[in-house]
Image (tube, grey):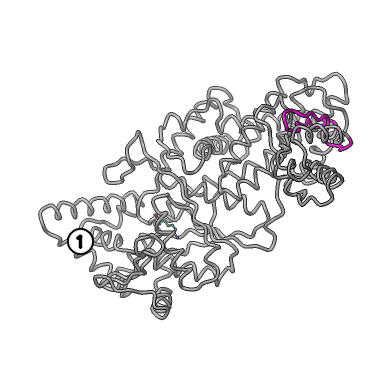
Amino acid sequence: MLFIKSQIANKIEQIVKSINPQSQLSSEEIKNLLEYPPDPGMGDLSFPCFKLSRELRRSPVQIAQQLSQMLSDVPCVGSAEAVNGYLNLKLSDAFLKDYVIESIFEKKDQYGAPDIGKGKTVVLDYSSPNVAKPFHIGHLGTTVIGHSLKKVHEFAGYKCVGINYLGDWGTQFGKLIVAYKKWGDRETIKAGGVDELVKLYVRINNEISKEEESGSSELAAMARQEFHKMELQDEENISLWKWFVQISLDEYQKTYKQLDITFDSYKGESFYTDKMPAQVEKLREKGLLKIDNGASIVDLSAYDMPPCLILKSDGSTLYPTRDIAAAVYRKNEYAFDKAIYVTAASQCLHFQQWFKVVELMGYPWYGELVHVPYGTVSINGAKLATRTGNVILLRDLFAAAIEKVNEIIEEKNPNLPNRAETAEAIGVGAIVFYYLSNSRMKDINFQMEDALSFDGNTGPYVQYTYARTCTLLEKAGKIPGNSGTVTDESESTLLKVLSRFEEKVLATLSDYEPYYITRYILEVATAFNRFYHNCAILSAEDKNVRDFRIRLTAAVNQVLSNAFPLICLRKTEKV
Ligand code: ARG
């Protein structure tokens, strides 16, 4: 639709200039004024003439009238009508048919891809779980929003670096080491993997809480001591720590594999241990550090923020310190044009604070740092909490979804080839689709039944639609060349939906909202299914009509093919 909008905007600009040569209104501005009317009965595009009123010293009503008479020679315009200062346009079906379908065939897997990222690098920090803790639905957001944003940037030509900034350093490892030394057993952990680590972690936390209640802090002190030994590179503790990290990673990899996610770097927090002192020094040199109760902080009161904590009173570093060191490292390593961080909204202040500190430190690239937050996830209204067991592990969630798909396949199509693979693609896809269906800031009250509901606007529905196009095309054989005309309104609607793909991708890039793509996929699927029900495709009597409909189906297949991976959805050719 962007090309169509430009065509119309160029013509309007011409007309405006012919009436008032002094007009400053550019074709680009006009293009941005073109809107989609809320009611499609009013037209496919609408141009409000109020802004022109000043330029042309006429009433909007008059301008709309005049424009409506002068736009008929623009090839994409089917008809133009003036209504109360608005110019309402209907697009030409003949133009849409040739232009949209042929663009799709010409650009193929690049159709919809805006050409804006070439030569630019984006670093995306996402998923980034805290090691030795379970990977649960609280991590779904950062993982799928982050990966989707990576895919969309790649689609737009950016070079992308996906970083899993593992939370692999900190006092939690001291706790785990104490727990392991007290209660752990190597063989049990080997067999049970991360679950056993989680058990130890939960147990030590419970014990520490109990101790606190009775006024003692022996275990907590032991944990600090063990972590301190880690910091001093104590051999035994470092090797335990490496082992714990590896066990956790092995587990995470299974989930990433189900989602088709790979990372370019797994450099976690531990990697930055020796990179922090230089930044702390720089802060000190710049006179930004203040001592507050023994701790070193950057005062941000001038920016209406609480201070950013850099060093604790015992000299140990903190989360912001590591993030600053990591950002500097990444800038040097990847020369990014943009660095995106996807985390829960509860970390908003943390990012605002350290972004500000980076600015105060004089790094000119502070403006390239982008925090992309998302809303909270609760289960049946209650906060997620590992300790009380109010969590749903991603592994279990995916397994439940896959099992449900398997049951349906068993009932409807037991001889389906690639059954296991298909069930996984649809099951996991259903969860991802559910998650990415709403604006990222919307809080989610996770209900297993909703996530596993396959009726209506769901992942399985769009997968099924994609498979339907595949089956049709397989039956059709060779895709015919350009022929025929639009004869049904559902064809025209479908063409218009297909034409909007690139705009959706651009909007996703500017708002960091993968759900635009999710909703778009639904729009395509719905428009295609309407067409499918309204129109005979393979059985159309007229050969030209049949050929055109097959070509249109192939175009839909291409657009869905391009869009699915943008939201981590695998394609299933047969269901
Ligand atoms: N490990 C953190 C957590 O689980 C998220 C890390 C986000 N990335 C960052 N650069 N701070 O809360």
**Residue 184 point in image, percent of width and height:** 25, 56
- Residue at x 31% of width, y 72% of height: 296
Q: Nearer the viewer, residue 210 or 339?
A: 339
**Residue 431 point in image, percent of width and height:** 49, 37
Residue 123 is inside the magenta segment? no
- Residue at x 60% of width, y 27% of height: 415
Q: Nearer the viewer, residue 244 or 108?
A: 108
Question: Is residue 56 in view from this perspective?
Answer: yes
Q: Nearer the viewer, residue 52 or 495?
A: 52
- Residue at x 69% of width, y 56% of height: 116
**Residue 71 point in image, percent of width and height:** 85, 36
Amino acid type at mark 1 = Ala
Q: Nearer the viewer, residue 375 or 390?
A: 375
Q: Which residues are magenta?
A: 73-94
Q: Image quarter for residue 426?
A: top right
CB at disc 1 and ligand 1 closer than 8 Å? no
Q: What secondary structure is found at the residue carrying circle 1?
A: helix
The residue that mark 1 highlights is 220
Question: Is residue 478 in view from this perspective?
Answer: no
Give the position of the N terminus as an image quadrant.
top right
Residue 75 is inside the magenta segment? yes
